[in-house]
Image: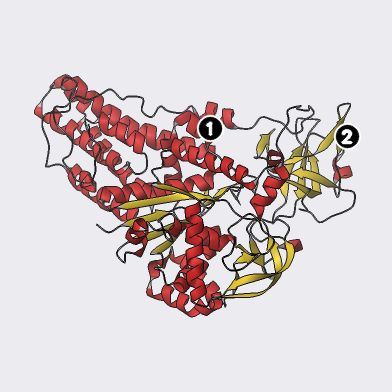
Amino acid sequence: MKPFYVTTPIYYVNGLPHIGHTYTTIVCDAVARYRRLEGRPVRFLTGTDEHGQKIERAAAAEGIAPRELADRIAASFRELWVRIGISHDDFIRTTEKRHAAGVREIIRRIEEAGDFYVGKHEGWYCVACETFYTEKELGPERTCPDHGTSTEWRSEENVFFRLSKYQDRLLEWYRQHPESVRPETRRNEVVSFVEGGLRDLSVSRADLAWGIPFPGREGQTTYVWLDALTNYLSALGFGQEDDALYRRFWDDPAATRLHLVGKDILRFHAVYWPAFLMSAGLPLPTSVWVHGWWLRDARKVSKSGGNLVRLDHLIERFGPDPVRYFLLREMAFGQDAQYSDEAFVERFNGELANGLGNTLSRVATLSRQAFDGKTPPTVCDDNPLIAAAAEAVRQYREAMESLAFHNALAALWRLLGEANQYLVEREPWKLVKEEGASERLSRILWNGLEATRIVATGLLPVMPQLAAEALRGVGVADLPTSLDALAWGGTPTGVPLPDLRGLFPRIDKDAYLADVTPAETPAREDEDDAMISIEKFFETQLKVGTVLAAEPVPKTDKLLKLTVDVGEEEPRTLVAGIAAAYGPDEIVGCQVAVVANLEPATIRGVTSQGMVLAASVDGRPVLVHPGEEVPPGTQIR
């Protein structure tokens, strides 16, 4: 079978893992598990990106070495992947010696191709994304178009890569290999960008100590993207004496080389990376497959956006598999998706508890009652569920091949629906009382178990733990090792059935949402004496906002509803407990300090998207203002 190599991006160690990192890694895990069932040799890589100025600055602010910060954050990724059942074969860190060897080797090859030169680099630089931008690309007040943070003017001599040299070769690659960038909308986006003209790319920095020294260029450190992207090779042994994995999973023309990435790093993976590889004379990826963003309050979920979803409480309360199911079911791969706790509860109750859980419980319980605690003795090979199952499996496999996980799961649930309808029409619960352990009852219940078994088998890449339990619940003792198990006829007869009722207990929706909804805390008047680290402090995003409108919140004499411009496309709504000291007319036009990365809280029916800072003087709020007028959105540091 052809080798299959699948990678996540390596995650930057400037913050703890959140829903974006988790989603990408779960997608890769589902792909890897599916391909293993297909029988292909699979190599699944994830890891952390640990070099760069952001890490250097964050560590200095905390008074520690960059390696210490990287070690701590990398450990949090490793721990989470264990908790949610990620089956990666390797975890690469860019601070490892094996990675540095790979970087040196790809630089050597590009140098031999004559594609490096030294030049002066000037422009507006975003530390957060380690990228230079032109004036045309910048946001208001010369902010980063991605992060919205201030950029810095940089001018220095760097090593440049002749990216412009590869413009025509890249366009030819996209044309000859339509699968090179997927979905098609993203490939069109990349083609348009490259057709617009490529500028040579700076691949080193002169003022950066935390990174891999650029070979043969004294005083230069390898730029983060040439460094980071090479992880896909270095993790396989590229540049090292033992490169058997590289030869098998990358250099073999028959190998599939799949990168799964978010759309914010599309350009780096679909333009810069293949150009580096072309220059070095190395095989290109088979496909760079791009997914959308998880949104919350119509904004991308991110550390810099201040609206993180870390999923910790869901995993702790319900286990990893329902979370894995929800993420793969909720997002149409390639498009953006909106996260909400309510949507999670509805998916869990409607599809897992009512759908799979109830069907499994019904057929297994009836079988145990009628056949001495065992699966029915008679197989039925002539019934309408056979055709329904074959069609569902066809749709499932087609969807899994195209990474349309939501469609693959929908196909399995259509089969569950068919099975439930089959049971409702034949009423086996009545036959148990009327006929006992009859052959007709045996056939009906075996069919129900068999349809459930096929669904559970299809769920193994998505919910590996609970799908295995569901298979055990229909009498399958050994986990399938092949997709052949999706064929009709695999439920064994006359084997013991364990009692697995309660595999998916329903969630009390109102109680759960009340539990996870932030309490009404419009202002904080008490002080906490506990010390926090500088890293923890820097997680708070403070911005200057201009109050555009203000009005009282009904049924309270303490709260004002404010409309505040914080430099974003749309003003934010904030609820502030300042009505006792400030009237609506008095505060309009004032500039205030805003905590911009608080999770939204519903306060007296109004969703507050942040917090206004105020001092407390004998219980009276006194607003914090900048000393002079500044543009809305200016960061407070």
Residue at left 39%, top 68%?
283
Residue 548 at what x, y percent from top left? 80, 50
Q: Position of residue 247 (x, y in %)?
A: 34, 61
Q: How many marks?
A: 2
Q: Quadrant of residue 118?
A: bottom right
Of the 4 image quadrants, the one containing the N terminus is bottom left
Q: Is residue 409 left or right of residue 113?
A: left
Distance of label 2 from label 1 (alpha carbons): 38 Å
Q: Is residue 140 above or below residue 611?
A: below
Q: Considering the numbered disc 2 on the image, is that residue within a helix, a strand or a loop?
A: loop
Marks 2 and 1 close (CB-CB < 8 Å): no
Identify which residue is drawn at 61% across, 32% down.
517
Residue 132 x %, y %: 66, 66
- Which mark, residue 313? 1
Find residue 20 and report its horizontal and vertical position in percent.
Answer: 53, 48
Residue type beneath disc 2: Ala
Residue type pointed to by label 1? His
State the residue position of label 2.
581
Seen in the image, is 51 located left or right of residue 317? right
Depth check, front residue: 475 or 161: 161
